[in-house]
Image (cartoon, rainbow, N blue to C red):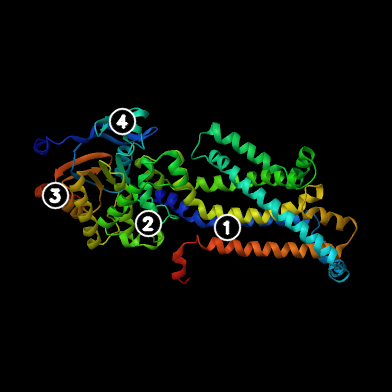
Amino acid sequence: MELNKVEKPNKLIVDINNLNIGYKNQTILSNINLQIPQGQCWAIIGPSGSGKTTLFKTINTLIKPLKGSLKLIDIPVDSKKNISRLKGKIGYIPQNLGLISNLNVKENILTGSLGRLSIFQSIFGIIPEDEFINTSKIMKQLKIDHLANKDIRLISGGEKRRVAIARSLLHNPQLLVADELLSELDPLTVKLVMNQVKSLQNESNTTIILIEHNIEVAAKYADVIVVINEGKIISQFSSTDTTKMNEIKELITL
Amino acid sequence: MTNNDNKGIMKIVKATFISPSFFFVIITILTIIALLDINFFRIFSQGKFQGIQNLFTTYSLERSEKVNENILYALFETLQIALIGTYFGVIFSFPFSILAANNFNSKLVYIPIRIILSGIRTIPSLIWGLLAVIAFGLGPRAGVIAIIFYTIGYISKFQYEIFEGIKTDSIEALSSIGATKLQITRYVVFPETANELISQIIFMFEYNIRSSSIIGFVGAGGIGYLLSLYLDYFRIGALSTALIYLLIIVVIIDFIGSSIRKRFQDPNFEEINF
């Protein structure tokens, strides 16, 4: 592919070859190939039930692939030891965000630092000073610093999403995977959230993979768009490639 | 779509609301059969309301200073037993409840733990009191031990059932961050289930006040000993006074409990009308 030639100097953060994913005796995704270089933002689009979330859970090492090879941040995902080496390098924002309802905004974000705490510190909730500094910095960048002590159930959808982003950015992941982060948001909030995420991404050279329903949004913020349908990657193209874009648009619009 | 396909889906759609109502009807019928079996309805047919009338007219409350003093002392001891028993019972139930949840453990772990827990629950608190008296001698110490066991049996069951209903989202998010199982338990499982846990603890404390007033019957301390004495000597007036004191305590605990629980309600409720 031409695209890969241009991006060659970057190292691959996600390297998936001939991967089959599924549960027990049911294959959900077959023959998946994905090579995602560092520092890019990729969007995965496709209809509901096409296997996007399953692919995401696999990238998060939550599901073991049936066949093929999966390499994340140059670490092959094959043994328990390697999987534990990967923990903390990937930030995952689940579809329903997974915020903890009895903790407030600040506490929810601070749970992002758990990977760095010792057993003693985490049991008694003794959090080092620099975690607080990082948290307040990220909150400021994402413009949620005024919500610090607010109940997580009382903030709006866009704010909740920014809290989830802040939590996963707190441990400085090399790869951020967000499942339908922008759905249910109005265009203005999408712009706000994405601009903040993008500027953070440029700072730390984080790779981002998004699941997105809206192809316009995907084209605007992502570098590359991957289309999945019925468990297969049917197309993969640069978001600047307008002819491909129109093809896919025709395919998915009524 | 063929007609056959449609029939299948119609059946599924129709069954949604009917089946719970159907079960309700069946259970109601079974209850009525059971009531007939124990001749329950006779209390209405024999016209003997004399007993109920006697209950309220024959006896008057006994409120001598001695009775008051005895009751207050015993009541205080009961509260102590309930507090200590609930505290340790709840703490000891945490590992049990985590090990008994089927979503965190394999069958090899949770099935034996559940058998132990149902074993604990099979034995009524009075018998726990008796066993503790035999093992540790008379007095409140035995009562505390009985209440601890009793509490472990119940709180663990309540807790693991709630743990099993926990959503995977937050666990997935934190586990990718690199949180260990212990950390996930501390920062996801407990906060997410805190509302239920708190209402269970308050319920259990209330319940333990009642239990620890019963286990005194077998000599495990508390107001139960006094109640059994009053019963034996047929001092129904003094017994009623003791029960009224107990009622006051339970109402106060309930009031405190609901005000604590309120802090954990969904705050959005204050803003909606329904």
Q: Residue at x 72, y 52 (%)?
A: B211
Distance between the alpha carbons at the discs numbered 2 and 1? 42 Å
Tags 4 and 1 on a common chain: no
CB of mark 2 within 8 Å of CB of mark 1? no
Residue ID for mark 4: A77
Residue ID for mark 2: A105
CB of mark 1 within 8 Å of CB of mark 3? no
Residue ID for mark 1: B21
N-terminal label among 2 and 4: 4
Q: What residue type is labelled 3?
A: Met
CB of mark 4 within 8 Å of CB of mark 3? no
Q: What residue type is labelled 4?
A: Val
Residue B271 in view (yes/no): yes
Q: Where is residue B117 in the image (x, y as percent from the top left)?
A: 63, 40
Q: Nearer the viewer, residue A50 or B194?
A: B194
Residue A66 position (above or below residue A158):
above
Residue A253 in view (yes/no): no
CB of mark 2 within 8 Å of CB of mark 4? no
Distance between the alpha carbons at the discs numbered 1 and 3? 52 Å
